[in-house]
Amino acid sequence: MNKKLVAITGAGISAESGIKTFRDSNGLWENHDIMEVASPQGWQKNQALVLEFYNQRRRQLHKVKPNKAHHILADLEQHFDIQVITQNIDDLHERAGSTNILHLHGELFKSRSSNNSNYIYEQKDDIKLGDKAEDDAQLRPHIVWFGEEVPLIPKAAEHIAKADIVLVIGTSMQVYPAAGLVNYISEKCQLIVINPDDTDYNFEKRAVHIKEKAVKGMEALYKVVLENKL
Ligand code: OAD
């Protein structure tokens, strides 16, 4: 039986595809205050602005492609039983061919009713003011905003607790509750971090840190796997 590998990914894995990370832009997200565009308060204040912000992100997502880091992670399914737990709202893991993906913070290519989170739809194009869900409520992006519940945390924690290897790629691990998932890593679990910058995760001391960008880091990791050293 293959070992269980859980990959926790963040904005850094999509950076080389051309999508900006959050923390690297000084609290601004594509020139917007994060709370203006990614909180229930921001939505109450200006729905048109929030919709336009995510419409732009969605249009951008149509133009970018998965990079080699996404592809190698998908290829590793030949060697491991893999669960991807991503904080990213893009679909680049799907397009690269990964099969088991949890989107903790939602998905850009989905929308939902602003009154009922069970009414979820495919959304490849813009959401406009006046676009309604089946309960007649305005459609909003299917994104977890700051201050909202993250419903997939218990499921993610279950996977992490069972992992033989946890691979953390391109995330600052600063945003809770996602950041708290590392507390479920078992004692015997092997930990690998791919991040070009220093990190201060609480498990850093017992992790192998490949201090490279995602593509180079995943190439290095793949080599180790092919040499049967993991
Ligand atoms: P961050 O922007 O907080 O962190 C990006 C991480 O990627 C940093 O640790 C960088 O050092 C690293 N990095 C930068 N370039 C990289 C590269 N080419 N290869 C590998 N790593 C690289 O992004 P997240 O941790 O994903 O939430 O942020 C978590 C959440 O905060 C997001 O999901 C979002 C945001 O607010 C919501 O929208 C709810």
Image (cartoon, rainbow, N blue to C red):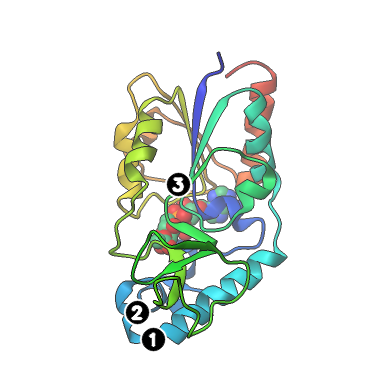
Q: Which mark is residue 46?
A: 1
- Looking at the rendered structure, the secondary structure element under dot 3 is loop
Query: Residue 128's x, y, as percent?
Result: 53, 82
- Residue at the limit of the structure toward the top, as seen here: 1
Asked if the residues shown at circle 1 and circle 2 are in contact, with their CB atoms under 8 angstroms apart, the answer is: yes
Neighbours of disc 3 within 10 Å: few (<14), some (14-19), many (20+): few
Q: CA distance from mark 1 to mark 2?
A: 6 Å
The foreground one among 229 and 164 is 164
The kind of residue on which mark 2 rests is Gly
Precedes in sequence: disc 3 or disc 2: 2
- Compared to residue 42, the image places residue 205 above or below, namely above
Relative placement, left or right, of 90 versus 152 is right
Of discs 3 and 2, which sits in the foreground?
Answer: 2
The kind of residue on which mark 3 rests is Asp
Query: Residue 208's x, y, as percent?
Result: 48, 30
Q: Which mark is residue 42?
A: 2
- Looking at the rendered structure, the secondary structure element under dot 2 is helix
Of discs 1 and 3, which sits in the foreground?
Answer: 1
Q: Which mark is residue 78?
A: none
Residue at 56%, 76% in the rendered image: 55
Residue at 69%, 18% in the rendered image: 227
Quadrant in the rendering for residue 28: bottom left
Precedes in sequence: disc 1 or disc 3: 1
Residue at 37%, 62% in the rendered image: 117
The kind of residue on which mark 1 rests is Asn
Q: Which mark is residue 198?
A: 3
